[in-house]
Amino acid sequence: MRNILIAFAATIAVAASIQTYALTIDEQVEALLAKMTLEEKAGQLNQYSGYEIITGDIDESKISQRNLLVKKGLVGSVLNVLGTEDVEKAQRYAVEQTRLGIPLMFAFDVIHGYRTIFPIPLAESASWDLEAMERSARIAAIEAAAAGQNWTFAPMVDISHDPRWGRVMEGAGEDPYLGGQIAKARVRGFQGNDLSLPDTIAATAKHFAAYGEVVAGRDYNNVDISRRKLWETHLPPFKAALDEGVRSFMNAFNEFEGVPSSANTYLVSDILRDQWDYKGVLVSDWDSFGAMVTSGVAADDAEAAEMSLEAGSDIDMESDVFVNFLPQLVRDGRVDEARVDEAVRRVLRMKHELGLFDDPYRYINAQREKQLILAPEHREAARDMARKSVVLLKNDDQLLPLDKNIKDIAVIGPLGDNQFHMNGFWRGKGQAKDVVTLLDGIKAAVSENTRVRFAEGSGLESMDTMQLRQAVKLAKKSDVVILAVGEDADKTGESSSRTNIELYPAQQQLVKAIHETGTPVVMVLMNGRPLAIEWSAEHIPSILNAWLLGSEAGNAIADVLFGDYNPSAKLTMTVPRNTGQIPIFYNTKRVSRPLDNTRYTSKYIDSSIEPLYPFGFGLSYTEFSYSPIKLSAKSIGFGESLTASVTVTNSGERFGEEVVQLYIQDMVGSVVRPVKELKGFEKIALKPGQSQEVIFTISSDDLAFYTRDMSFKAEAGDFRLFIGTSSEDLQAVGFALAAQ
């Protein structure tokens, strides 16, 4: 009772201190700002970590010092302070022991779940199911908010064509249009319809901008691209997130045109603040302000603070440069206090929108935390999302789905009975003990007459000949082998770049040895990035790209293996044949000498230029047939539109879902144009023999691009329109955009 009274009194005190009862949010912000010292203003722009999860260098001796800074009102937000108990303790420091009682915001990287872990975002994107992805983010927000969090550093909307970069697992793949649609879905999921409700959290679009272009796919590396590529490829998903109302942005680690993103006036001031009129908060990545000293752009931390603030950045995560240097920079005349005030206004407004001034403890409810974390309905949603994310890459002779009454099943591979790796990187507060392994999922799915046995066969990167012999012996005695191979969860994600994206040699040896037994093999590939599996694609009869699927991984994969769910996922990143093909992506621009049978054409002399599996590819246990495309018009004018329709029929014997994809090619432009661009998609569900007409509307606006002078507009001329089941399996018709 005493705690309740204290909380109530504190809330009243905060309200009274800023005269909330009759003022608008803007008026409340200005009233509070007028009372703040320079040091307190800098404090609101200062963010520290709580040490549970770190992604950079940190001095743990500073823990007690930071607690003191919170009590002095010199910290505005914290990250990695988790659970209602610890959140409440930190919030009481801020609200009850500081001069102004300004509440803290609590941030955490809730990327693909809080405690109930969903598939990694790249896997979810393969579902092409926007509603399911929104639901995934919604549940992640509900659990995180129940544990005291109110801000997530997600979604990552970076586009990348380089699977060597570990952080591709955190994004939506290679296409800017699809990436934008997924960004919107995830923002809606995290933020809901009312950010002040205690089951929503503020979302963050990151990393602004072009972080997916780091040279050689190496994290924290530089970026060397044109403004054209920036606008064509990397900015669209950020603009989509902004249009959906994303509450914050995060700076990228990389430079653009020689200037680090955190201090890049072109990115932050010109584009984000001015052209896009973004009024929200811009937070640094971990120590990205201080890193400008390391990169040699800022002479010292004070200059780093000056450059970052003047560019339009607001919150300093873990650099200490704002709290340590901004007050003196203002006093020395190097920084205008009005610019500091702008940043503080944005932070205070965000706190108001989260409802923290109305009730600083609104997210702190131990009973709600206990009730909602790992709720059964959350796990069921995770299972549904996971099975929708599994891509069927190959299925010779319809080996899949398997019969649940099969006599002997061998589960072989280092990931066959592993809980830890299934959660993937950025696993929030997910725990290995909560994960259903592939072995457990299979055992739960088969009949009581089926014998399921397991052999590890190899480590992820190591080979034990005794283990290999045992696995081979088991395979020979079984009717089918489920071969579980892939990646270490912690060798995908941040700071996990690879020079070679093939299976590790030990696993390659295992795959070949099991194949040589002659027993039918189903490869279950568990990975955080596209892997080059050319040998396996040639020799293994059935392959599932199962990614790292989270808490319900084993049950979801078993649903697909035994036909309780018909796979419907489609790749959102192109799968190369080998590492040497990287970067590889479907919407490459046309070249002066395209591949043909002559010598001097754009090709490799030691490998095909074609991918192993293209963007948009994924098989099903049923078959879909497409009628010829029907256009409502062969020509449109500016400001007009046409419709393109196909009738899709499930011509197989199983219920199934199909992702119908629409692409456009501009035949002649003022600049070189892509061979095709995704412009729409629809996921449909059909019973055997059932048909559905799918109608797409194409307007002249959909034909716009950045022309020679970087104006975004359409040009008159001829176009091709494609509809089909992947970026390569398409039919085409022509139409024209008439001159004005």
Image: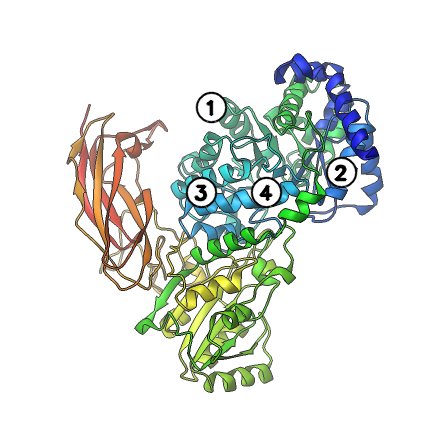
Badges 4 and 3: C-beta atoms under 8 Å apart? no
Q: Which residue is mark 4?
A: 142
Residue positioned 76% across, 34% down in the render: 91
Identify the secondary structure beneath mark 2: helix
Residue 88 image label: 2
Q: Which mark is residue 588?
A: none
Q: Earlier in the sequence, mark 4 or mark 2?
A: 2
Which one is earlier in the sequence, the residue at label 2 or at label 1? 2
Distance, label 3 to label 2, CA atoms, is 33 Å
Q: Which residue is mark 1?
A: 275
Q: Are marks 2 and 1 in contact (CB under 8 Å)?
A: no
Q: Rounded to the nearest whole Å, what is the CA distance between mark 1 and mark 4? A: 34 Å
Q: In this rendering, would 200 be left or right of 700?
A: right
Amino acid type at image mark 2: Glu
Answer yes or no: do the residues labelled 4 and 2 have beta carbons within 8 Å? no
Mark 1 lies on a secondary structure that is helix
Q: Quadrant of residue 227?
A: top left
Report the mark closest to the observer, 2 or 1.
2
Residue bearing mark 3:
182
Of tags 4 and 3, the one toward the viewer is 4
